[in-house]
């Protein structure tokens, strides 16, 4: 098969450190979201004791909205954490592969 393009066609370049740093940052951000959920829980304590427990429709709707928000943020946190972990792992795997390939070329020289 003939590929059109310059010498960099089908080439992948990766800055292993930058990818690993980005992955670590995403994991930290997912932790920050978890901390924010804890703060939300504390802030909503008085609301739960009064409005949610009042038996009103708006209190019930607010409780449902909070549950939906928590669920969505929990899923988002997990996705961000997984993505960060995958980025860091791919940087380590890429660096290991690069090192192994370099070693093979040095053996052949």
Image (tube, helix red, strand yellow):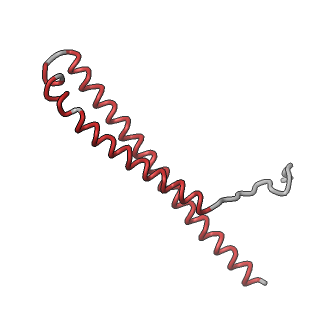
* Residue 92 found in image quarter: bottom right
Q: Where is residue 1 in the image (x, y as percent from the top left)?
A: 84, 53
For this rendering, which residue is in front, 8 or 2? 8
Q: In which quarter of the image is residue 50?
A: top left
Residue at position x 21%, y 20% in the image: 59
| 10 displayed left or right of 3 | left
Q: Relative to 49, is 19 on the left or the right?
A: right
Residue 38 in picture, x, y percent from top left: 28, 42
Above/below status of 83 relative to 72: below
Q: Is residue 53 left or right of residue 30?
A: left
Image coordinates of residue 31 in percent, x first then y, are 38, 50
Residue at point 24%, 26% (across, down)? 63
Q: Position of residue 62 (x, y in %)?
A: 26, 23
Residue that appears at 28% across and 37% down? 40
Instruction: Say which quadrant the C terminus sits in.
Output: bottom right
Residue 98 drawn above or below residue 104: above
Horizontal side, residue 42 vs residue 106: left or right: left
Residue depicted at 53% across the width and 58% down the height: 21
Label tally: 0
Q: Which residue lies furthest to the top in this view?
A: 57
């Amino acid at each position: 098969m003939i590929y059109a393009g310059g010498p960099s066609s089908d080439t992948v370049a990766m800055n292993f450190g930058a990818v690993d740093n980005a992955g670590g940052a995403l994991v930290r951000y997912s932790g920050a979201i978890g901390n924010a959920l804890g703060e939300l829980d504390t802030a909503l304590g008085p609301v739960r004791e009064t409005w949610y427990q009042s038996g009103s429709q708006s209190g019930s709707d607010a409780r449902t909205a909070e549950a939906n928000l928590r669920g969505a943020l929990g899923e988002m946190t997990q996705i961000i954490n997984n993505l960060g972990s995958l980025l860091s792992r791919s940087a380590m795997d890429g660096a290991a592969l690069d090192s192994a390939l370099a070693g093979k070329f040095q053996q052949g020289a």
